[in-house]
Image: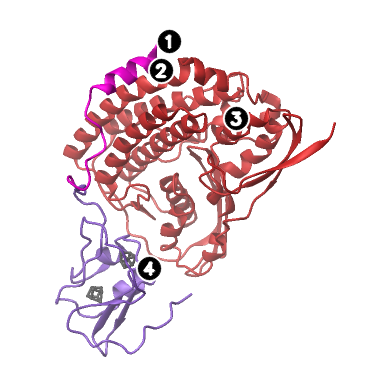
Chain colours: A red, B purple
Amino acid sequence: MATTIIPFGPQHPVLPEPVHLDLVVEDEKVVEARPSIGFIHRGLERLAEKKEYQEFVYVAERICGICSFIHGQTYCQAIEEIMKIPVPPRAQYLRTIWGELSRLHSHLLWLGLMADGMGFESLFMHAWRIREKVLNIIEATTGGRVIFGSCKIGGVRRDIDPDTMKTLLAQIDDINKDMHEIVNVFLSDRSVKARLVGVGTLTKDEAYDLGCVGPMLRASGVSQDMRSLGYAAFNEIKVEPIVRTAGDSYARCEVRCGELFQSVNIIRQAAAKIPPGEIAVKVTGKPTGESITRTEQPRGEVVYYVKANGAMNLQRFRVRTPTFANLPALLKVLQGCDLADVPMLVLTIDPCISCTER
Amino acid sequence: MAIFAMERLALKWAFKKPVTSRYPFEPRVPLPHSRGKLEMPTPTCIHCKICEKKCPTDAITVDRAKKTWVIDRLRCISCGACVENCPKDSLTLSEMHNGPVVTRDREFAAAVVIADKPSPPKV
Ligand code: SF4
Ligand code: SF4
């Protein structure tokens, strides 16, 4: 049968960021997808060699707009590991709370985008209505709405006072109630199911071999979550990975919905356990050595490699972001899918292109 | 698993006020401690250059001899590093965000000599 090549992206309604796919199509079926990335490369890894290592936190946070806090946190953890800085427990708990808030807003954003991708506009609006409440909590506690700017090497820059914490918990209860309503729709609505169930199935072995991370991996039945490594306050707050075995788009949606409530749970536990005390230690000196740090972002595992040689600037800085790890799996699920399902499948990996290209 | 979940959700919201605010009749009030526009330094500024050094985007230029304090609004990311490090507490971030910046001119602190030409941004 004759094949046609259909260009998908870099500009497409479902893509908030530019990525290009050449879809080789036979009739209505995609037989192959060839990606090309590199539209928004910003050279942030090289910038690390020019900025002071303490200033670079601001840049690390801007690697990605949606998982910004965890990027900053991972960078701080990497430097703290090299310099052997003891981070105060209160700061660790605050980092955990903000990290989970950022997961909440990222997953709600994804749910909204997915509803939008399948043309379910009212559901999209509801998901983003709830996300707005999360953003308000973030603004009230950190001062920024998506770029938190509250993490620094040696601790955090702002504290949450007891009154604000009480308001935060009340708002989280409210958000939890709202989330139940929309999650019910996502998991039971006939039209949502028609678009997701059985689409883009990835088996457990394929997901593992292709090096998937995050919800993409957990939806295929591999129980792996970097939070179980025990960074920040996760050595005291235990996280049970949310796993589904179906491996299709619906399972990925289920995993993310489950993680919403898991995050709420973690925030509540952290708020109950948070110890009083200092929020930061003073950092002096220059880092020497190298380290690899892994944390769990909303989209999956991120790996930071940092090498310093005792100068004000780092010698080498490298990030492996979750979307980069999920791209091979995306190409795999696109093989043999219907042309009309391509936008949904691209969305199910929760693509974040600007962090992929850094 | 809920039946008619979307229908119930839609019905519930059909009789409520919209959640979006009625701008411009109801302008958004920023939350307390939101990081907004960086205010110009108060006269307590001693031109020590600490803010210039700490700024991650090199937005501030301080000239000790001419006693000027200059900010490039297009570079400032409202991070607050200068505010935290100012020894004289001259700087504050207001809660309101910065208005639109329409020219590349820099903003000078009051009562200072205006430099002939803004220096090209450092790379
Ligand atoms: S750090 Fe404060 S006192 Fe020093 S130059 Fe800047 S504004 Fe002036
Ligand atoms: S707020 Fe941040 S970016 Fe803006 S001038 Fe101060 S240090 Fe520079």
The residue that label 2 is drawn on is: A184
Density class for disc 4 (Cα within 10 Å; few <14, some 14-19, many ≥20) is few
Q: Secondary structure at mark 2?
A: helix
Some atom of ligand 2 lies within 8 Å of the CB belonging to the residue at label 2: no
| Residue linked to disc 1 | B1
Quarter, ligand 1: bottom left
For disc 3, the neighbor class at 10 Å (few under 14, some 14 to 19, many from 20) is: many
- Mark 4 lies within 8 Å of ligand 2 (Cβ measured): yes
What amino acid does circle 1 point to?
A: Met
Residue at (39% x, 34% y) in the render:
A104
Work out whether disc 1 and disc 2 sit on a shared chain: no
Q: Amino acid at mark 4?
A: Arg
The chain to which mark 4 is attached is: B
Chain identifier of the residue bearing label 3 in the image = A
Label 3 vs label 4, nearer the camera: 4
Q: Position of residue A61 (x, y in %)?
A: 43, 53
Q: Are marks 3 and 4 on the same chain?
A: no
The span from disc 2 to disc 4 (Cα, nearest Å) is: 44 Å
Q: Are marks 1 and 2 in contact (CB under 8 Å)?
A: yes
Asked if the residue under mark 4 is in contact with the one under mark 2, i.e. CB atoms within 8 Å, the reply is: no
Q: Amino acid at mark 3?
A: Leu
Residue labelled with disc 4:
B75
The CA distance from mark 4 to mark 1 is 51 Å
B67 vs A64: above or below: below
* Mark 3, residue position: A217
For mark 2, name the chain: A
Main SS of the magenta part reads loop
The magenta segment is: B1-26
The secondary structure type at the circle numbered 1 is loop
- CA gap, disc 1 and disc 2: 7 Å
- Residue A241 rendering spot, x and y as whole percentages: 50, 26
